Image (cartoon, rainbow, N blue to C red):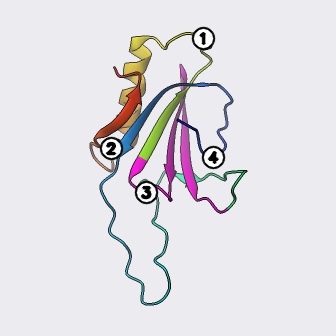
Amino acid sequence: MPSLGVPRSHWPVVAWIRLKLPPATAPLTLMGPPLPPDPPLEILEKNPVATDPRKRVYAFEQEVEWGIVRLIWDADDPELLEAELRAPVYGARVPKEQVREFWNAVKALIAPIGPLPVEGADPRP
């Protein structure tokens, strides 16, 4: 899973979750193309993509004691919300208890939206 935008940490992605968002209602426009959708969470901030400045990517990072939890949303794919766990773990799997804590941290961050179906994840708790 490629990471979009510029993360604050250069630690590797050791776990990720891809969540399916409910379809957003398209804004009504009288003339011209429809406006791009707004991010699904207020905590998401614009996160530039150095290779394509036209892309609208939003991200949020939260430090936890075992790494960084990062949420990413791409306006070009508005029905997916991705979460990454970045940690200084090289060449090994993340311990199961950290995976469970990562999933719980993501659930807490997406609480304003509600529970979302999981499209994919590695590793699953």
Residue 102 occupies quadrant? top left
Q: In x, y percent, where is residue 109?
A: 40, 40
Q: CA distance from mark 3 to mark 2?
A: 18 Å
Q: Provide the residue designation for mark 2.
A: 111
Quick one: which residue is furthest to the bottom in this view? Answer: 30
Q: Residue at x 43, y 53 (%)?
A: 41
Q: Residue at x 54, y 44 (%)?
A: 60
Q: CA distance from mark 3 to mark 4?
A: 15 Å
Q: In x, y percent, where is residue 26?
A: 36, 72
Q: Provide the residue designation for mark 1.
A: 91
Q: Amino acid at mark 1?
A: Gly
Q: Amino acid at mark 2?
A: Ala
Residue 19 occupies quadrant? top left
Q: CA distance from mark 1 to mark 2?
A: 32 Å
Q: CA distance from mark 1 to mark 3?
A: 33 Å
Q: Is residue 109 above or below residue 91?
A: below
User: Of marks 1 and 2, which one's residue comes earlier in the chain?
Assistant: 1
Q: Nearer the viewer, residue 43 or 80?
A: 80
The local crowd at label 4, few if under 14, some if 14 to 19, many if 20 or more residues have their Cα within 10 Å, is many
The local crowd at label 3, few if under 14, some if 14 to 19, many if 20 or more residues have their Cα within 10 Å, is some
Q: Residue at x 39, y 30 (%)?
A: 121
Q: Provide the residue designation for mark 4.
A: 5
Q: Provide the residue span drawn in magenta.
A: 54-80
Q: Provide the residue designation for mark 3.
A: 78
User: Of marks 3 and 4, which one's residue comes earlier in the chain?
Assistant: 4
Q: Is residue 71 magenta?
A: yes
* Quadrant placement of the C terminus: top left
Q: CA distance from mark 1 to mark 4?
A: 24 Å
Q: Amino acid at mark 3?
A: Pro
The local crowd at label 2, few if under 14, some if 14 to 19, many if 20 or more residues have their Cα within 10 Å, is few
Q: Nearer the viewer, mark 1 or mark 4?
A: 1
Q: Secondary structure at mark 2?
A: loop
